Amino acid sequence: MTKKLALKILEKIKQHYIKPKPKWHFWIKEIILWFLFGVSIVIGSLAFTLIIHLLKNDILPMRKFLHANEYFLYFPFFWLLILVVFIALAYYHWQKTEKGYKYKPLIILGVSILTSLLISCILLNLNLGRPLTKQANQLPGYSKLGKMRGQHWLKQNPNRLAGQVLSEIENNQFLLLDASEIEWTILTDENTYPEDLSFILPNEKLRLFGEKETDDTFQAIKILPWDFPINKKLNAGLKKMK
């Protein structure tokens, strides 16, 4: 830097009363950036948890029973978008930190994704997938999608049934009341998914895949929790499943 240029810079500093920013300003900025990074990772982890839970409990168990167009109703596109957005925000906030420029983009993205996935696995191991899904179904906007899925389940189908449990399992069978107030005897066997049916308790609401053997007997192949919001404005049968 020439002496002439240095003098010009000093003169400009004097004219505009430019002062160096105090160190605490940079400390606060750094704390805020890392806090926002952490928030982005946590939200990304929640999205990861919901994606894995929905794939495991909707898409995979139902894949043999769903038509191609029905996959779009159940695939977690919304949470996939949320995951992408917040992983991108995590990358942005890390890169803006004091030493963020030193790391390659792939390293930042990789750490962000792996951290979100690790937290997600912890949440799933704590069996928080279903409670989080229930809470997500109450979110404005997203709840409409859950109600659409619920309506889809209540449509008459010889291989599908939904209702409220009336009795505990005894001799591999239990009673279930559907939305039309028909009382069904549900049969289970060693081929029924999942193997652990301990979640089937009185007043629980369920979705079932299988075959109707008679007008009030249903052989269950797959049994899943209801997990959808109840729309009070739907038909009278659905109201009875509140």
Image (spheres, rainbow, N blue to C red):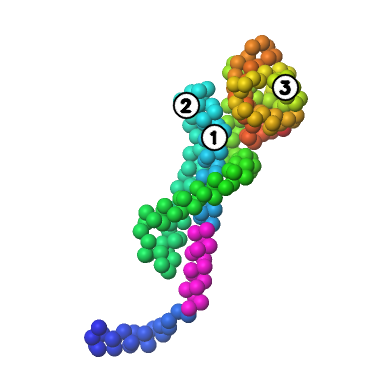
> Which is in the foreground here, disc 2 or disc 3?
3
Q: Based on the picture, tell me whether residue 122 belongs to the magenta stretch.
A: no
Say which of 163 and 124 sits in front.
Answer: 124
* Element class at badge 3: strand
- Please name the residue shown 75% across and 29% down the image: 202
Earlier-in-chain disc, 3 versus 1: 1
Tell me residue 143's x, y (percent).
60, 39
- Left or right: where 113 falls relative to 62: left
- Please name the residue shown 52% across and 58% down the image: 38
Q: Which residue is mark 3?
A: 174
Please state the extent of the stretch shown in magenta in the rendering.
Answer: 23-38
* Element class at badge 2: helix
Q: Quadrant of the C terminus?
A: top right
Disc marking residue 16: none
Identity, as a three-letter code, of the amino acid under mark 3:
Phe
User: Rounded to the nearest whole Å, what is the CA distance between mark 2 and mark 3?
Assistant: 32 Å
